[in-house]
Amino acid sequence: MSHTLKLARRPTRFRAIATVSVLFGLSACDGDRLGPLNPDQAATAALGAQSDSTPSTVASVSFAGGIPMGTFDQPTHAFGPLFNGAKLTLKPWELLPSLAVVKARGGRVTLMFAGSSAHYLDSNGHFDLNRWKVRVDRFRSKNFSSYINDGTIIGHYLLDEPNDPSNWNGRPVPPSTVEEMARYSKQIWPKLPTVVRTESSYLAKWSGTYRYLDAAWAQYVHRKGDVDVFLSRNVADAKRKGLALVVGLNILKGGPNSSAMTASQVKTWGSRMLSSSYPCAFISWKYDAAYLSSSSMKEAMSMLRSKAQNRSTRGCRGS
């Protein structure tokens, strides 16, 4: 590329960055307003500033097959040869532009609409279903059915760790409430699978039948014991309750003594979690550019991507 062409591109890039800065400066504290400007255009500008690759430049890329593999909070520009799956938490105006980029890069995502739990806790710090519904309702006006139908969206991520008392001031969210959340989601988007990040073993404690919840989530960490036992138990409980299963690793804090996993541990434990044909996705916590940048970690992730891609393709809808 010539020096002249580089100079010619700089004003455009600087204008895009400046525009994004102004747009975000106009947003409210919660980021739910952008004043008189078109919010979808704002999100498109922000996504464009992340990477030189836009949907149009990779429009020919399609999902490679198998099951999606990636991380939490993965930037859209990271979708590609290494990662083609993710869990994303998006604001309403980010939804359509983000999905366009993900699809163009051959990706698959599970989406959280409610956002941080701080938005749906009551005055006592307990989960508030009505407040959660209000958060989800923000997406009612968005028409993203085509991304559900073509498989770009693999699930609605209802809630994070309902089983953990520390998240809800000592009162875990019971499986029956999770099922009610799933029912509410299906009233709005009947074809969108519903997913909750808690082990199927927790969900199996409920004696009821899951008619609306589709999938549980088994994320391995070293403190949970033998990885094969962990996986077998979660697969068995998911099957017993008619649930699909997402699996993954806590790569940043899942090693011994809550350390980051080494490349060797990622390869070994990830391979075991991918040894079953039952999971519908392999998504790990969470994206960290510095952690993922070493050659050994890239090699480990590349091996897991190959294993995920060689799995039989299956959706995250329960039975």
Image (cartoon, rainbow, N blue to C red):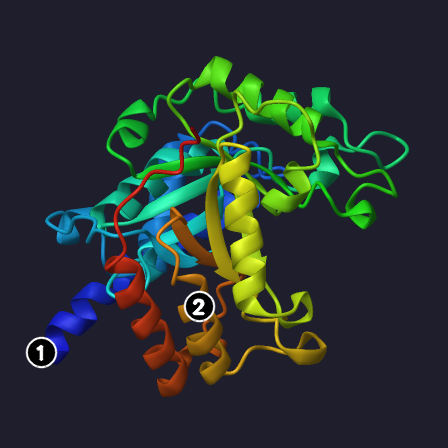
Q: CA distance from mark 1 to mark 2?
A: 49 Å
Q: Is residue 155 left or right of residue 171?
A: left
x and y, in percent, of residue 78 in the image: 34, 61
x and y, in percent, of residue 87 in the image: 47, 48
Provide the secondary structure element on which disc 1 rests: loop
The 10 Å Cα crowd at callout 2, few under 14, some 14 to 19, many 20 or more, is: few
Q: Is residue 309 left or right of residue 235?
A: left
| Type of the residue with mark 1 | Ser
Residue 14 appearing in the image: no
Q: Residue at x 47, y 27 (%)?
A: 36
Badge 1 or badge 2: first in the primary sequence = 1
Indicate the quadrant containing the N terminus: top left, top right, bottom left or bottom right: bottom left
x and y, in percent, of residue 280 in the image: 38, 46
| Observer-nearest of 84 and 243 | 243
| Observer-nearest of 284 and 138 | 284
Provide the secondary structure element on which disc 2 rests: helix
> Does residue 267 lie above or below 314 as drawn?
below
Q: Residue at x 49, y 13 (%)?
A: 187
Residue 2: give its label.
1
Q: Is residue 213 left or right of residue 49?
A: right
| Type of the residue with mark 2 | Arg
Residue marked by disc 2: 272
> Does residue 232 lie above or below 131 as drawn?
below
Q: Residue at x 30, y 42 (%)?
A: 314
